[in-house]
Amino acid sequence: MRGIPHSRARTLTAVLTLAVSGAVALSGCGKQPQQTVSGGPPLKKMDAFEERAAQIVRDWPKVSPVHGRQQALLPLVKAQRPKDAGTAREITVTVGHSACDTRFGARSHESKGLVVVTGWGKRKSSKGMCTEMLATDKVTIRLKDALGDRKVVDAATGKQLLKG
């Protein structure tokens, strides 16, 4: 910086320093931040049966019954032992539901050692009178895997219906 007055040299040095530091600071602009992506779609919220089945699988065999009566967790009256449990991919359960239910059925949740099952009912309308009389009907549940030596457990009561 020969030939430039001292105060002007300092000003020029300061401007160059600011310009270089600004360029360094701005060098990250325009780049997308690195993202971490999970291994699948967002998890859907579990319904009452899925939550209960997960709890039973986690806490088995120390399971308490659910309190109250829920249309998504109706207790089962019984389950029929399949002829060949080792290869059977279906189990038949007797669902206790309201006589006012227009639709009813059963669901299952399978784990390595358990098949958790429940009954469900759907009323036509919550308005109007209902006798609260219990109706029972047999329902067949299709399993993803053969029953094998897994235990069948009622989600509502937490009781074992069948031994594998």
Image (cartoon, rainbow, N blue to C red):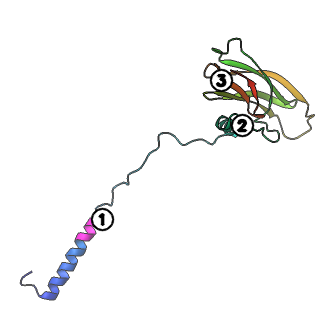
Q: Residue at x 30, y 65 (%)?
A: 26
Q: Amino acid at mark 3?
A: Arg
Compared to residue 128, the image places residue 85 above or below, namely: above
Where is residue 56 shown, x and y percent of the image? 69, 36
- In this rendering, the count of numbered labels is 3
Per the picture, the main secondary structure of the magenta-coloured stretch is helix
**Which sits in the foreground, 161 or 39?**
161
Kindly report which numbered mark, 3 or 1, lies closer to the viewer in this rendering.
3
Return the residue at label 3.
150
Q: Which residue is mark 2?
A: 62
Q: Which mark is residue 132?
A: none
Image quadrant assignment for residue 164: top right
The magenta-colored residue range is: 20-25
- Measured as percent of width and height from the top left, residue 29 is found at 33, 61
Which residue is the extreme one toward the top?
83
Which mark, by number, is residue 26?
Answer: 1
Q: Residue furthest left?
A: 3
* CA distance for labels 2 and 3: 17 Å
